[in-house]
């Protein structure tokens, strides 16, 4: 029994003081990825999350899917899904949760964090204040957990604010902005005016389900009475749910921090009014047995404060794909701005303008210009309102925050401040450390000197040469234009032979296309066009191009739309090779071609995008000369995904025991062997709601054995599904070399490895 007598003075809460190397406020995708990255480098992290679950907008409390540069496969950013921990989380979720259950995704995130001994996790804990040791230095953050009635004081030399609204940076006095910059400040031609609105609003979602008996619904008094107040009400579908209602948005005319509760009530008003319309208006069939299963209780926030760092990203950096010496990540989501009136606006629910390819994001945008021991992460990073329209999405914020976690580890190890990373070559060390864990910074490979594989002789039992993509698939009707995307050699004149089925005599146009920038996949350059007269029925057609691509890069063998013609496809799939289509993906404002109005600083170009599996087969064809881009030299070239080239060793499918042999002139001390496998970086892997056709991507090697040169098994894996596989022996090994024996993922997909890193 506990019994206390009257206190004249107020009682104080239980207080716990924690010390760490890095204090992270915010447990969304950014905070989680920063924490795991830092912890794996050996530093102590306290991760403070004000909600009962991790994930922020991706959690079961909000249920927004994670997306980034892949943009629902609706843009020209091939093989652009975010790497490192962000990829690891999404691949894990695919394996456990291909149906996209948000509650299961909660457990994936929680497990990843709890598995790290160097992370102390505080859920249900809200940071509300900071203490400072000087004008420019944070000493500690203060937080309170209402569930255990405990106050926490977290002290650290380094802090990361990934809280969304920037509570730590705000309380510390850091410079910030809310709203849109005028065009004149940064020369951003797409900057909105006040009539469109300067802030993006919040959204809330609901789930419905069918039951086995009729269910009535009586709307609460606060529900929206007149559905016509929503100009887009005719777009409401009875079977839509979750973040397909992303356009249920409100609050852009309000203070998106301090008015959040008001915004929440308005969104509840919309949701229950919409459900009343679905159930009781008589406009929908077969709704008698439908019921509400879940309605969000907190809104998903898009925009509030943005804090000023050492550099502020702007529209031109995104659209022009600006290169940065301190690049630490990539983005690729469209510049995606929404009218401030949200669901009540008569304007389009969003305005999305895409760049032609991915763009680099600089480290300087994550370092506060005012507070010397503060990192910024998530949607609050240093970017204009327009650039924020692209950098704000969760796949991108998770990837970027990995750089913060790694930078914090470097600062701890070397006793540096965040700004010091930019001096004395440390930024190059940061970039390399990130790439070694899968960051894939565009145009920045793993340094050869950091990988012992580059000192070894590498021998492969076989190497794929694509002289034929076999004619063993279905027919694809050319209702839309289609192209085979292939890694081609400069100035090589290629010949292709395809199998055609024509309903009647017709003409088919074929083009060889490529991109202006060799690392882009927007085929705006038409190198050659040929026309072919076809007779009725099946027939082979030979295409001899008289010119080649200007440099070693991907080319598009392009078949223009003709609905009287079908192409034979193939069941074979190869790493770094795929088919694309000039189709439509309205979810990301892709109508086949981007045609912006004049003078907004955005490019006009066509979209050529893949189809989702199980569709999207390669176009069957004979190829002369054969594509020879898959050799074993690729496993030490520093790139762990296709980037202007395949960058992978791929075995021949007829090789029954694909093997790589690595041998040095003399024995080396090896503490780790890391394999980078193929998780299909082109597939978006949306985390919730949107299901996926498989648990493991078809390109991923499932089974392999690592042996020393005498044949002794050092490491064996069966049933793998993850991208990065790391073998760390309990004690370093003295090896003259080793072999890696792999099984093909399937009879239609050959074994592939992007990179082997040895250290």
Image (cartoon, rainbow, N blue to C red):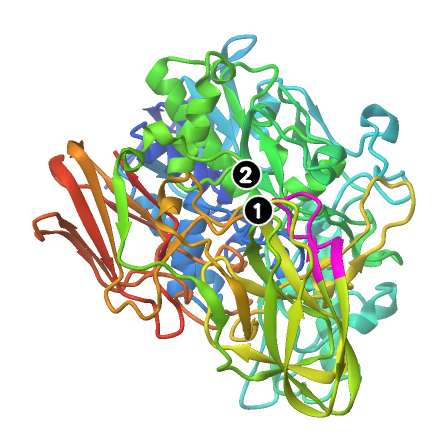
Image quadrant of residue 728?
top left
Dot 2 lies on which element?
loop
Left or right: 239, with 683 as reference point: right
Quadrant of the drawing holding the C terminus: top left
Q: Earlier in the sequence, mark 2 or mark 1?
A: 2
Looking at the image, is 38 positioned above or below residue 98? above
x 62%, y 19%: residue: 310
Dot 1 lies on which element?
loop
**Residue 166, x across and y down, in percent:** 59, 31
Q: Identify residue for label 1.
A: 552
Residue 519 in magenta stretch: yes
**Residue 622, x across and y down, in percent:** 53, 72
Residue 165 in magenta stretch: no
- Determine crowd level at label 1: few under 14, some 14-19, many 20+ residues with C-alpha closer than 10 A: some
- Residue 201 visible in this rendered orientation of the protein: yes
Q: Which of 441 and 524 lies nearest the eye of the viewer? A: 524
Quadrant of the drawing holding the N terminus: top left
- Residue 125 visible in this rendered orientation of the protein: no
Labelled pair 2, 1 in contact (Cβ < 8 Å):
no
- Determine crowd level at label 2: few under 14, some 14-19, many 20+ residues with C-alpha closer than 10 A: many
Nearer the observer, disc 2 or disc 1? 1
Q: Identify residue for label 2.
A: 442
Q: Which of 633 and 721 lies nearest the eye of the viewer? A: 633
Looking at the image, is 145 positioned above or below residue 215? above
**Residue 492, x across and y down, in percent:** 59, 54
**Residue 87, x across and y down, in percent:** 44, 50
Residue reaching furthest to the top: 134
x 47%, y 30%: residue: 404
Magenta part of the chain = 512-528
């Amino acid at each position: 029994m506990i019994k206390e007598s009257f206190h004249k003075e107020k009682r104080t809460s239980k207080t716990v003081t924690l010390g760490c190397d890095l204090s992270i406020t915010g447990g969304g995708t950014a905070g989680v990825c920063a924490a795991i990255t830092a912890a794996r480098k050996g530093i102590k992290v306290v991760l403070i999350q004000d909600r009962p679950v991790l994930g922020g907008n991706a959690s079961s409390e909000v249920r927004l899917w994670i997306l980034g540069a892949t943009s629902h496969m609706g843009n020209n950013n091939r093989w652009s899904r975010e790497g490192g921990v962000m990829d690891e989380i999404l691949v894990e979720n695919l394996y456990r949760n291909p149906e996209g259950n948000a509650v299961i995704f909660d457990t994936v995130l929680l497990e990843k964090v709890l598995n790290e001994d160097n992370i102390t996790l505080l859920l249900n804990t809200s940071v509300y204040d900071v203490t400072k040791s000087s004008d420019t230095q944070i000493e500690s953050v203060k937080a309170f957990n209402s569930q255990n009635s405990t106050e926490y004081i977290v002290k650290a030399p380094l802090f990361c604010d990934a809280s969304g609204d920037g509570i730590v940076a705000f309380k510390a006095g850091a410079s910030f902005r809310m709203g849109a910059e005028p065009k004149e400040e940064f020369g951003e031609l797409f900057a909105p005016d006040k009539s469109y609105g300067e802030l993006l609003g919040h959204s809330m979602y609901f789930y419905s389900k069918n039951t086995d008996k009729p269910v009535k619904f009586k709307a609460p008094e606060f529900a929206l009475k007149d559905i016509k107040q929503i100009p887009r009400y005719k777009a409401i579908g009875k079977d839509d749910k979750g973040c397909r209602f992303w356009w249920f948005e409100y609050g852009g005319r309000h203070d998106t921090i301090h008015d959040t509760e008001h915004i929440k009530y308005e969104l509840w008003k919309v949701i229950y009014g919409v459900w009343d319309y679905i159930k009781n208006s008589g406009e929908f069939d077969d709704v008698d047995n439908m019921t509400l299963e879940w309605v969000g209780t907190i809104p998903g926030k898009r925009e509030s404060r943005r804090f000023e760092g050492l550099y502020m990203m702007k529209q031109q950096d995104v659209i022009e794909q600006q290169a940065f010496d301190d690049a630490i990540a990539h983005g690729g989501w469209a510049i995606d701005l929404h009218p401030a009136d949200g669901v009540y606006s008569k304007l389009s629910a969003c305005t999305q303008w895409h760049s032609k390819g991915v763009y680099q994001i600089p480290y300087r945008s994550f370092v506060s210009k005012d507070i010397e021991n503060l990192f910024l992460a998530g949607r609050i990073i240093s970017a204009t309102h327009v650039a924020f329209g692209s950098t704000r999405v969760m796949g991108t914020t998770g990837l970027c925050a990995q750089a913060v976690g790694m930078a914090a580890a470097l600062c701890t190890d070397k006793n540096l401040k965040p700004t010091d990373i930019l001096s004395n070559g440390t930024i190059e060390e940061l970039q390399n450390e990130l790439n070694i864990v899968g960051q894939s910074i565009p145009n920045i490979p793993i340094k050869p000197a950091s990988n012992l594989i580059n000192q070894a002789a590498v021998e492969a039992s076989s190497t794929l040469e694509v002289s034929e993509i076999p004619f063993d698939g279905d027919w694809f009707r050319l209702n839309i234009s289609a192209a085979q995307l292939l890694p081609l050699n400069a100035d090589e004149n290629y010949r292709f032979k395809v199998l055609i089925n024509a309903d009647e005599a017709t003409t088919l146009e074929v083009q060889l296309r490529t991109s202006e920038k060799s690392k882009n996949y927007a085929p705006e350059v038409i190198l050659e066009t040929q026309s072919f007269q076809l007779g009725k029925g099946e027939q082979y057609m030979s295409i001899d191009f008289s010119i080649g691509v200007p440099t070693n890069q991907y080319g598009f063998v392009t078949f223009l739309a003709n609905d009287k013609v079908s192409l034979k496809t193939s069941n074979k799939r190869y790493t770094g090779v795929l088919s694309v289509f000039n189709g439509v993906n309205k979810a990301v404002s892709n109508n086949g071609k981007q045609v912006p109005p004049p003078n907004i600083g955005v490019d006009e170009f066509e979209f050529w995008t893949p189809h989702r599996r199980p569709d999207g087969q390669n176009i069957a064809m004979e190829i002369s000369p054969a594509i020879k881009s898959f050799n074993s030299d690729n496993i030490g070239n520093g790139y762990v995904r296709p980037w202007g080239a395949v960058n992978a060793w791929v075995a021949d499918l007829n090789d029954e025991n694909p093997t790589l042999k690595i041998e040095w002139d003399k024995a080396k001390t090896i503490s780790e062997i890391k394999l980078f496998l193929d998780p299909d970086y082109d597939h978006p892997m949306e985390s919730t709601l949107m299901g996926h056709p498989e648990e493991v991507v078809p390109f991923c090697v499932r089974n392999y054995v690592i042996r020393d040169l005498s044949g002794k098994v050092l490491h064996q894996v069966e049933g793998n599904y993850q991208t990065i596989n790391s073998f760390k022996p309990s004690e370093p090994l003295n090896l003259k070399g080793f072999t890696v024996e792999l099984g093909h993922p399937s009879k239609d997909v050959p074994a592939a490895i992007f990179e082997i890193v040895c250290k």
